[in-house]
Image (cartoon, rainbow, N blue to C red):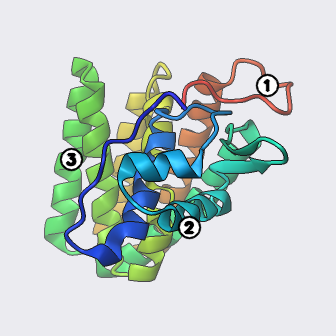
Amino acid sequence: MDYRFPPIKFNDMGNIRDSVFSILRNAILEKKLEPGERLVERNIAEQLGVSRTPVREAIRKLELEKLVTHIPRKGVVVSEFTKADIIEIFLIRASLEALMGSIAATKIKPKEVERLAMLAQQISDEQRKGNIQKSNQLNDTFHEIVYRAAESPRLYNLFSTFKEYITKFTQVAYSKPGRPEEVWQEHNEIIEALRDHDSSRAEIAAKHHVQNSNKAFLEMAFKEDHESNITINSF
């Protein structure tokens, strides 16, 4: 393992386990730890300045998310994302976003709808300027407002599990020529459904948006569609 974790400090000792999990998870999602790289419990604990117990527990949680894999005689290694993994995440996202949109339509406030409209315009403007990072940040904020408007903490927590994946997938999908213009239209379809408090339209618009994002991502991330175990290099 080439990447070294800086020591961490804790104000609340009860947060050690969650903090270690977040650090390891982010390192994997940000590709500081590459697919196939071994996670050595003892080394990670020493670098972070914690005992091996929270590291062991964090690795177990990472296994549940399929971010790491235990290989006999080799140990725990960072998993590779396959096309099937990506499609599964998008299917889950589509269902969650559709449900979020449906619920949000019944509860969203006028000022939140106007905020969404402003963000949709800003996202489009930043895309035209080539400010991809800024556009992605605004896009995250756009969807965050919809999620919050649904006022469903349990559903929001479920979605939060996939938030980092979605941000990175969106970056790839936006690179498809013509995709920013499609997003502009899709965002406005969502906004109009929310403004009219139309749950059915909001659900359909949100699902349609994710399905198109999925299609754009796959077109940009995978060059050959006929292979069943293609790994993603863009993630």
Q: Residues within 10 Å of mark 1 (few under 14, many from 20)?
A: few
Q: Amino acid at mark 1?
A: Asp
**Closer to viewer: mark 1 or mark 2:** 2
Question: Which quadrant of the structure image shows residue 202?
Answer: bottom left
Q: Amino acid at mark 3?
A: Leu
- Indicate the position of residue 64 as horizontal and vertical percent values: 66, 63
Report helix, strand or loop for mark 3: helix
Question: Is 7 placed above or below 157 here?
Answer: above
Q: Residues within 10 Å of mark 3 (few under 14, many from 20)?
A: some
Describe residue 202's horizontal placement relative to residue 188 as left or right: right
Question: Which residue was labeled with disc 2?
Answer: 57
Question: Which residue was labeled with disc 1?
Answer: 225
What residue sits 28% from the left and 53% below the top?
8
Question: Which residue was labeled with disc 3?
Answer: 119
Q: Residues within 10 Å of mark 2 (few under 14, many from 20)?
A: some
**Closer to viewer: mark 3 or mark 2:** 2
Task: Tell me, yes or no, whether the two marked residues, 3 and 2, touch with CB atoms within 8 Å.
Answer: no
Q: Amino acid at mark 2?
A: Glu
